[in-house]
Amino acid sequence: MLTTGALNDLPAVRHGFFCRTGGVSEGLFSSLNCGYGSGDKPENVTENRRRAMAEMDLEGGRLVTAYQVHSPAVVEVTKPWAREDAPKADAMVTRERQLVLGILTADCVPVLFAEAEAGVVGAAHAGWKGALTGVIEATVAAMAALGADPKRIVAGIGPAIAQRSYEVGPEFPAPFLEQHAANADFFCPSPRDGHFLFDIKGYVARRLSFAGLKSIQSLPCDTCAEDTRFFSYRRSCHRKEPDYGRGLSAIYLEP
């Protein structure tokens, strides 16, 4: 389990970005696959989630994850829900203590938020679509609605695909450049003619800064390149594998 120093320094806040090791799943899902949306055995995913919560000193039943759809939708969580009742959303916020907000990723950017003074935490799944359409700002606004001050919110950016591994087509930069010309900072030419390499983590960090956050820390991991440590959708596509596991990022408020 990886952590960021900025979030570690906050009182009564626990968080973790889990690697793919330490679980019971096999094959493509080896071993700590926490995504029911994969083709893994549900009982394996349940046990992996239980192990992750045990590492965070909590019972598995307190973990909530949404049905992620690459949107800017945010929900407030007041109690755990059944898996089949998970709302379609890509971010969650809560003031409830010992209720773990979990984000599932396999290259997209997991972002964990905390405002310790107000007692509010949040978690967001920022793929390029969600990031472009405002999931970061929506999460900050939802936390503010619960009493958080954006200037006191600390954000940790977890393991995600790095620019060197994220090649995009010639049409991809257009909506980002239409949004702001300065977004050209996040694209550089790819070795393949007419293609680009996209720095999605840098883009998410700038959106966090524009949302008013002063404390932002990013882990320097590359999920696509580090196959023994992380799951990766893009890597599985390159290898023509039929499926892939999902990594868990989680945050909660202690009693």
Image: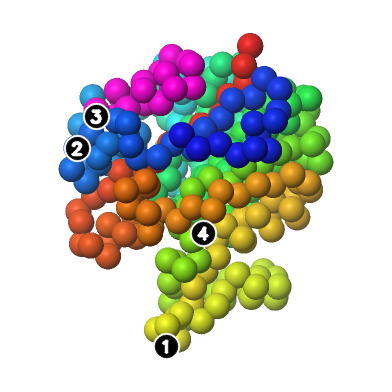
For label 3, the crowd category at 10 Å Cα-Cα, with few meaning under 14, some 14 to 19 and many 20 or more, is some
The residue to which callout 3 is attached is 24
Q: Name the mark on residue 193.
A: 1
The residue to which callout 2 is attached is 26
Magenta extent:
44-60
Q: Gap in Å between the C-alphas at discs 3 and 1?
A: 42 Å
Q: Are marks 3 and 1 in contact (CB under 8 Å)?
A: no
Q: Gap in Å between the C-alphas at discs 3 and 4?
A: 31 Å
Question: Which mark sits nearer the N-terminus, 3 or 1?
Answer: 3
Label 1 vs label 2, nearer the camera: 2
Q: Are marks 4 and 2 in contact (CB under 8 Å)?
A: no
In the rendered image, residue 21, in percent from the top left (x then y), is placed at 33, 37
Q: Gap in Å between the C-alphas at discs 2 and 3?
A: 7 Å
In the rendered image, residue 243, in percent from the top left (x then y), is placed at 24, 50
Question: Which mark sits nearer the N-terminus, 4 or 1?
Answer: 4
Say which amino acid is labelled 4. Trp
